[in-house]
Image (cartoon, grey):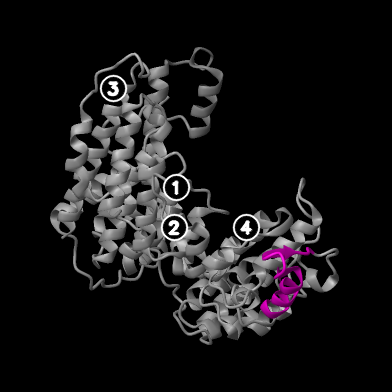
Amino acid sequence: METATWADLVGTALMGTERKGGTPAELLDAAALAVLRRRAGLRPAAAGKRPATAPHDPRPALPAAARRRLGLLLADRSGGSGGRRGAAPNLAELLPQWLGEATARGYAAPPELLPALLDAARARTDLRPDALALAGPRGLWLAELNTDWRFALRAGASGAAPPAGDAADGPEVRQLWEEGLFAERVALLTHLRSRDPRGALELLRSGWSGERAEDRLMFLDSLREGLSAADEPFLEQALADRSRNVRATAAELLSALPGSALAGRMAARARTCVAWDAGESRIVVEAPYECDAAMERDGVVAIPPAGRGERSWWFGQVVDAAPLGTWPERFGGRTPQEIIALPVADEWQGDLHAAWCRAAVRQRDTAWARALLGPIPTAATAVAPVGDPAKLLAVLPAGERSEWVARFIASHGLSEAFQMLAVCAVPWTEPLGRAVVDALDIARDAGSYPWSFSGVMGLAERCLDPAEADRATPLTAVPAESADTSPGAGAYWAEAFQRLVGTLRLRAAMSEELA
């Protein structure tokens, strides 16, 4: 069997050694010998082109302890698989924070960890901006050698500058724009928009009519970065686009420019709908009776969602697209707080205030956002802000935002605070952190199960100032159960607080290592 050909050996394996003669061990030995003969007889192929040398990265290397920490974080990216989380910190949730801080300090990723770093960025898009920034030019060099990492070359402003550079009129930019994949073109446009808004607009205008509708929508959305009056002529043309979604996006962008012609048209419409009745000392509303072609061209959607009346639907769209500066003039120079306090006739107040909320968010108007939120709540005041409080809070300065949310939590607990907490600056201020920990303690004493507050607890692990670890440490003990508490809840709460404290201490250690 040793001298048998490869075809003979395959035939024996298919037919069986009993029929062809020999034993299974002899067949395997002969096959191993035949493989060695075949490999020894191969002629070496011509050597491929050697890759270019990796570029130099002038940034400082990570401190040794931080380098080891990054290795541990990249090695444990699973983040758990549901169920009971245990008391150990979730390293997968700490990786984005570590990457953000390392990037902000200007470090370069260790060369030996670049493959794992790129794998992490490939698996999680939320990691890409900071992961690719940390990977730097060597990360892009590696990405050119492995198709699994080609996303890094298309990242643009999402993590690394495109290879075409910053000049919108450069030949490399033009070639990438005309020949690149859709994702590459979106990344390029977003990248250029942050550096040369006018040049990016001209690039977009150059082939606009030939783009697919879904592509035009994505490209138009990139104009949010650096939006200015210079974009108005192009956006006015887009109001006549054959795609309804493109028209709607163009109208939304124009309404965010209070000086635009569309904003002026909407203001005129809004003034015909909302007036002051001096005799009754109240606001009166006369909603539109039809949605004409001019309104549709300016972004008003004619058909309302199920359960919504046509007139109130049209009215809300007109008012939320009108500049907020329309209303002090309309109501005798009153401030936003004074206008919002005015009575509104015929149950139109909810629609009017909701439209003003959307306008305040779109136009980033802090005075109106502050007025619509109302005073910072206390235990004696009921809070029922119109619209989405989290979106209104996002318009306010960071310090005022945190103070408002801290007082809200102190007065009303955590049940309605999750979205508000998500828009607060990280790390949370000391008053906000104290309010969150105290509210969690109150919920524990009330006998609630901790998983009812798992979202807030997860935010606290990532957003609390690590200095709050000492404040939370006494809560890690298992409380005594009473007849009013849920069975076993105390042990779960203790475990959750142990994880919180452990995570805060680990975050403090990571910061020290990076420093």
**Please, is residue 292 above or below residue 67 in the view?**
below
In the image, what residue type sits under mark 4? Ala
- State the residue in front, 215 or 452: 452
Q: From the image, tell me which residue sits under label 3.
A: 491
Residue type at numbered disc 3: Ala
User: Pointer 4: what residue?
Assistant: 354
What residue is rendered at 70% in x and 72% in y? Answer: 211
Circle nearer the N terminus (3, 1): 1
Q: Amino acid at mark 2?
A: Pro
> Answer yes or no: do the residues labelled 1 and 2 have beta carbons within 8 Å?
yes
Mark 1 or mark 4, which is nearer to you? 1
Q: Position of residue 503 (x, y in %)?
A: 25, 42
The crowd level at tag 1 (other Cα within 10 Å; few <14, some 14-19, many 20+) is: few
Q: Secondary structure at mark 2?
A: loop
Residue segment shown in magenta: 263-287
Q: Which residue is mark 2?
A: 375
